[in-house]
Amino acid sequence: GEDVEQSLFLSVREGDSSVINCTYTDSSSTYLYWYKQEPGAGLQLLTYIFSNMDMKQDQRLTVLLNKKDKHLSLRIADTQTGDSAIYFCAESFQGGKLIFGQGTELSVKP
Amino acid sequence: EADIYQTPRYLVIGTGKKITLECSQTMGHDKMYWYQQDPGMELHLIHYSYGVNSTEKGDLSSESTVSRIRTEHFPLTLESARPSHTSQYLCASSDIRDRDGHEQYFGPGTRLTVT
């Protein structure tokens, strides 16, 4: 079945790098995503990676995909207090179905 | 900027009441979705639609119902609210031309509390 797992909390200091990890079970997904949810708001797409790619960089964000281990990570360089939010990993399948992880709450301390 | 709206943002209602959560988008998207977000933050798909007059149940069983009479509107109804329905409800939409539902645009959510 389809399952996506994330650790629930991560705390870092401002200026450090943050690495948020995600594991998934179904390798038939087409894309993998990182969404950000700020308090009281909906989800905002941060970045995505096609399932046959290994890495994608987008400004401060780096996504790494290890298909063998079914592991996805999001690295945020120079983390700022404004990056404090909940980050969701998600897989998509044909037809547009998304399966989300539980979300990782990132806390950035000054 | 995503143009997807949900009302109300917050709702506190008594057990047994009928409620409708509204979701509208102005992007002309054919695909629309409802997710339930548990207090532990995980999202579960409860309903989706590929277009007018199309509605399907999602992965998580829900006592709610949906309708899709117009492309831009995807309301969710609970006929008789119960405390177990207390949750955050997120609506999303995506472009049907995007075969993989590449980007789902989310509304701000409705936080429902049933007392």
Image: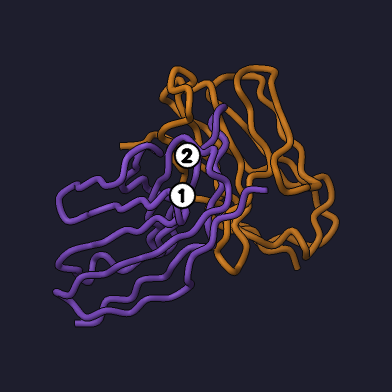
Between the C-alphas of marks 1 and 2, the distance is 7 Å
Residue type pointed to by label 2: Tyr
Identified at 53% across, 43% down, the residue is: A27
Q: How many marks?
A: 2
Residue A35, image x, y percentages: 39, 51
Comparing A21 with A97, the one in front is: A21
Q: Where is mark 2, residue-wise? A: B5
Task: Indicate the quadrant containing the N terminus of chain B: top left, top right, bottom left or bottom right.
Answer: top left
Disc 2 is placed on an element classified as strand
Which of the colour schemes (rainbow, by chain, secondary structure, one colour) is used? by chain
Question: Can residue A88 be seen here?
Answer: yes
In which quarter of the view is residue A74 placed?
bottom left
What is the drawing colour of chain B? orange
Q: Tell me if I can see residue B7 in this picture.
A: no
Q: Which mark is residue A53?
A: none
Which three-letter amino acid code belongs to the residue tagged 1?
Pro
Residue B103, above or below A104: above
